[in-house]
Amino acid sequence: MEHVYLDNAATTPMRPEVIAAMTAQMQNDFGNASSTHYFGRQAHTALDHARQQLADVLHTKADHIVFTSGATESNNTVINQVAFAKANQGKHIITTAIEHLSVLKPLQALEQQGYRVTYLPVDEKGEISLADFDAALDDDTILVSIMYGNNEVGSVMPIKEIGARLRDHQALFHVDATQAFGLVDLNPEELGVNLLSASAHKLNGPKGVGLLYRDGDVHFPSFQKGGEQETKRRAGTENIPGIVGFGTAASLLDVEQKNARQQQFADFSAQLTAKLTAADVKFAVNGDLARPRLQHVLNLWLPGVSTYALQTNLDLAGFAVSGGSACTAGSLEPSHVLTAMFGADSPRIGESIRISYGMTTTAEQIDAFGDALIKIVRRLLARAK
C-alpha cells in the first residue's frame, strides 16, 4: 500500500539537496566555528554562507539573522526578552486568538507577572479586524506579535497594514512566519516588521534549527548565557550541519517558484473540493479559499463525521492528514483556532480535518485521496445512522 503524506503544515520531508549538503558538512567540516584553527575556520565559513543565504531570502543583512533551535525558541525569546527589556515603557502586548501555542503560552505566563495581553478575535474566515487592532493599540503597548499565516486554516493577517501603523509607535512588531517562510516572498523591512521567526523543517529542511530575524534597531540582552556565539545573542556551539541544511533549503526556491507552488496548491484544493461536490459529499471549508491565504493548507468540515474516526480511517487507508496543529493533535483539547473562529459549541471543532500539501504532492495523489475520503465519509455516516 502506498502511503501518501498530506500533513506538510506539521513538518516536511528533507530535500535530497539538503541531505547531501548536511552529509558533506558532517563528513568534511566537523570543526567548532568558534575555533581559530583551520577546522574552525572551515566551519565558520559554512556558518557565514548559510547566514547570508537566509539573509538573501529575507532581503536583509546577514548580521540581522540569529540562529536558534527553531521557531518555538525564537517566539519565546522575542516575547520574554522584549517584555522584560521594555517593561519600563509599558506592559501591554497585542496578539491574536489563533496564534501558535509557542506564542500564546509565554504570553499567558507573562499575564501571571502583571502584563496585559489583548487577544484579537477573528471572524469565520480566520481573519482579524484592523479596527479591533486600532482600538487595542495604546501608549502602553510594547509588543505586537501576530503570525503571518495560520497553520490550521491558512488565513493571512494584514501584516503590512499593521507594520505601517507601528512605524511611529514604541511597540516592536514580531511576526511568526513559520508557515509562510519558504512559501511566500517575505521582506520584513518592507513590511515594517522588527522581528521574525522561522523553522527549517517547514520548508524541507532539518528539524532542530530555526532563525530569529531582528532589524538593526532592535536591542535586547543575550537570551542564552555562555559564550559569545550569534553576535552575543545566543550562547552555545552552533549546529553547523543543521544550519547548512536550513540555508540550502531556503535558497532552493526563488520568488517565481514560490508563486508557482502557491498556484499548484490552490489547484489541488480546487481539485479536491470539486471532487467532493460532484460526489454530493457535504463539506465546508474552514476559512475562505477566495481570500489571500497560504495555499498549502486546506481545512475541511465534514458534518457528522468525527475528526478522530476520519483521521484514523484515512491513516489505515494510507493517507496522513491532521486534526489540527501537530502540537495539539495528540491531545483531547479542541482546536483553539476553530474555537476562536466558530465558537466553543460549534460542531466543526470535532468534525474537521487539515490537509496540507508539499513538494512531493501530486494531482494523482489528490485524486486518490478524494476517492478514499468520499468512501470513508459515506461509511462513517452510514454507521452513525
Image (tube, rainbow, N blue to C red):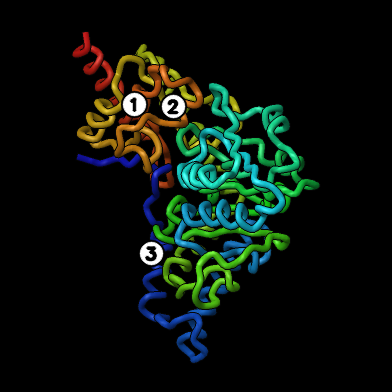
- The Cα atoms of the two marked residues, 2 and 3, are separated by 32 Å
Q: Which of the 4 image quadrants contains residue 271?
A: top left
Label 2 close to label 1 by CB (< 8 Å):
yes
Q: How far across and how far down the image is residue 275, in percent?
A: 39, 21
Label 1 or label 3, whichever comes before in sequence order: 3
Relative side of 58 to 70, left or right: right
The circle drawn on residue 263 is none
Q: Residue at x 54, y 75 (%)?
A: 229
The circle drawn on residue 271 is 2
Q: How far across and how far down the image is residue 336, in percent?
A: 44, 31
> Total marks drawn?
3
- Near-viewer residue (312 or 379): 312
Q: Secondary structure at mark 2?
A: helix
Q: Secondary structure at mark 3?
A: helix
Instruction: State the residue lying farthest toward the top.
Output: 385
- The Cα atoms of the two marked residues, 1 and 3, are separated by 32 Å
Q: Residue at x 60, y 64 (%)?
A: 65
Circle 3 residue = 19
Label 2 or label 1, whichever comes before in sequence order: 2
- The Cα atoms of the two marked residues, 2 and 1, are separated by 9 Å
Q: Which of the 4 image quadrants contains residue 28?
A: bottom left
Circle 1 residue = 370
Q: Is residue 191 above or below residue 15?
A: above
- Observer able to see residue 48: yes
Q: Identify the amino acid type marked 3.
A: Ile
- Observer able to see residue 264: no
Q: Quadrant of the N terminus?
A: top left
- Near-viewer residue (266 or 186): 186
Q: Identify the amino acid type marked 2.
A: Gln
